[in-house]
Amino acid sequence: MFTSQDEWDRGYADGRRYRQLSDNERTLLATHVPPPDAGRALDVGCGVGELAAHLAGLGYDVDAVDWSETALAEARTRHGEVARWLHLDVEDDDGEALHADGYALITLRFVAAFLTDRDRTLHALGRRLRPAGVLVVITPLAADTPAERRGIALDEDELAALHNRWDSVERHATEGLAFFGSARPAPEPVHSAGQSTRR
């Protein structure tokens, strides 16, 4: 599992790619987070831009951020200017490039397992939601993931910890993935319970 920015850049440069957005995921997004009027979305860990481009196609004005400049360069080549492609470390950068008035939707697809401080980062992102905004986490399930790839997935205890950090949560399952739609972060935790290896 990649743990540094250089490793992610090399992985993308070497042609490593990740699971494509499925029809079931597209259906869940269209059903549960249809874009509001003038809706703005933030896609965290956008990779080569497939989800960001899909959200733009749904009608969102999209900011797409990633740690890997290589991935962002490919996203621009593949999808053009359908999104604002931003080179950003969502855990450590100040987020000044993000919209100050917030987002109707924030997505993290195959990202949560790689966060060093999951609680703090998701809480900070949740504070960027507009009223009635939704944060969506899509993650592989550990029970359906081979042991050698366990680091990319969350187990039921980790999923429960995510659930408990939000006032309102809907969970859906599809093709070995958990799809969480969450609104309104609960009060900020005193300490981090959901630690994982840094992506």
Image (tube, rainbow, N blue to C red):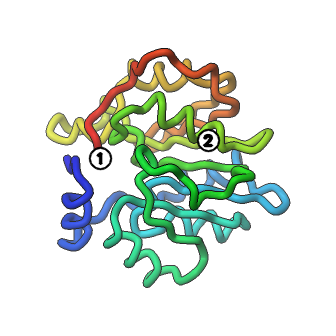
Mark number, residue 199: 1
The residue under label 2 is 135
Against 78, residue 89 (above or below) is above
Q: Earlier in the sequence, mark 1 or mark 2?
A: 2
Say which quarter of the image contains residue 41.
bottom right
List x then y, in percent, for residue 32: 70, 45
In what element is the residue under mark 2? strand
Q: Which residue is drawn at 57% across and 22% down?
A: 188
Left or right, 107 with reference to 133:
left
Q: Which residue is drawn at 67% across and 22% down?
A: 167
Against 102, residue 47 (above or below) is below
Q: Which residue is farthest top? A: 190
Q: Between tags 1 and 2, which lies in front?
A: 1
Residue in front for this viewpoint, 16 or 186: 186
List x then y, in percent, for residue 11: 21, 64
Badge 1 crowding class, 10 Å Cα cut-off, few under 14, some 14 to 19, many 20 or more, is many
Residue in front for this viewpoint, 33 or 196: 196
